[in-house]
Image (spheres, rainbow, N blue to C red):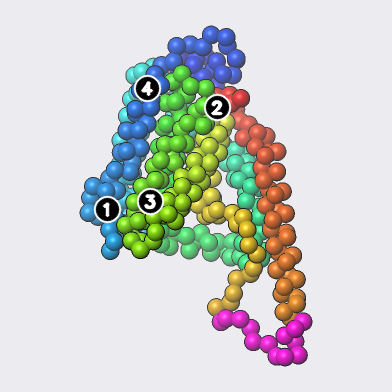
Amino acid sequence: MAPTGSSLYQHLSSYFKNAEEEPLPPLSSAFVGALSVAYTVLYVLPFYLAPTTRPSPSLSRDAPSVIRARIRFVSLSVALSTIATIYILADRANASIVDIIRLLGWYPISIIQLAKSLILTAILFAGPLFESAVVEGRWKDWIQGQPLHESLSSWIGWRNYVAGPVTEEILFRSLLVPLHLLAPLSPTRVVLVTPLYFGIAHIHHFYEFVLTHPHTPWGPSIIRSLIQFGFTTVFGWYATFVFIRTGSLVAVILIHTFCNWAGLPRLWGRVEPRVAMGGPTVRGKEDSGSELGKERSDRLGWTLAYYILLVVGAVGFQQCLWKLTVSPGALAKIG
């Protein structure tokens, strides 16, 4: 932690020392809440102000021109929010530049901690990683770096794996979490509360989906948006927990990119390999029965292995959650 003479850390140090009397918080919860809403609106609102970023029935959010324009707008929004946060921390919390950099999670950067955070996330996704690497045979592509090339060869990839994770983690973790920690909120409540802004920021996708899919009934559209809100909020809990425990912005950016790449884990259905581009193999009558039986056996084995790994990964994640996130750079003590 920073030197005890730093007023910024006097408030946070109480969570480590379990002090009976906490120092007066530098920021009020009402002020931080209003500021968080303002930051969230500033992040989302530009999507609908300019014709280059506003979706329409004839213009998808996945159009390269829309993605490029939105990246420019959100980058500007995050830059303005960052400047405002740095000023508030320096003026209201009397923080030095070193304190601010540490509280925002910009420094120090520990390669070991980054690796531990990625390993922890990979444990949770043990089942999906098995399906992709073994069942679908993509492990050779991974070694050759093909997924990275494919991901960054399109504007959708840049949005999903670079611009999105970087700007969202700066705003919803690096900026909002320190502000809430300096308000009269416990770190546990910060973990639970701040991801709600992150989840709410994704609700606007409901409007975009209805606009670009006018023939889809409202029921499935609402369910789709609720699932997305739930998933982003749960991810936000995890990312906020890791950010507070490690004090590393880079760690949560990498986790965010990994989760965007992995997607939602399969929770039902059979696990099957990829179908070759040439279509299914044509077999003769003499070997069709034995080959078909072998394929069914393989699919059953892959499916059983996947769901076993899904459960083992979830249990392993729970067992390693605290061990792999312990760090001397923690911003506060949780629990």
Tag 4–tag 1 contact (CB < 8 Å): no
- Quadrant in the rendering for residue 209: bottom left
Which quadrant is the C terminus positioned in? top right
- Distance, label 3 to label 4, CA atoms, is 28 Å
Q: In front: 44, or 158? A: 44
In this view, the residue farthest toward the bottom is: 285
Q: Which residue is mark 3?
A: 206
Above or below, comparing residue 78 to residue 286 in the picture: above
Please give the name of the residue rendered at 42% of the width and 36% of the height, measured from the top-left corner.
Answer: 197
* Amino acid at the residue labelled 3: Phe
The image shows residue 212, relative to residue 16, as above or below, that is below
The crowd level at tag 3 (other Cα within 10 Å; few <14, some 14-19, many 20+) is: some
Disc 1 designates what residue? Answer: 54
Query: Which element is circle 4 on?
Result: helix
Tag 1 secondary structure: loop
Find the distance from the CA under tag 2 to the CA under tag 3.
30 Å
The residue indicated by pointer 4 is 30
Q: Write the start and end of the magenta stretch as one range.
A: 278-290
**Which of the two discs, 2 and 3, sits closer to the camera?**
3
Residue 122 appears at what percent x and percent y?
Answer: 62, 49
- Decide which of 249, 186 is in the foreground and name it: 186
Q: Amino acid at mark 1?
A: Arg
C-alpha separation, residue under disc 4 versus residue under disc 2: 18 Å
The mark that comes first in sequence, 2 or 3, is 2
**Amino acid at pointer 2:** Thr
Q: CA distance from mark 2 to mark 1?
A: 37 Å
Residue 98 appears at what percent x and percent y? 44, 25
Whichever of callouts 1 and 3 sits on the residue coming sooner in the sequence is: 1
Using residue 277 as the reference point, say whether residue 303 is left or right of it: right
Secondary structure category for the residue under label 3: helix
The residue labelled by disc 2 is 188
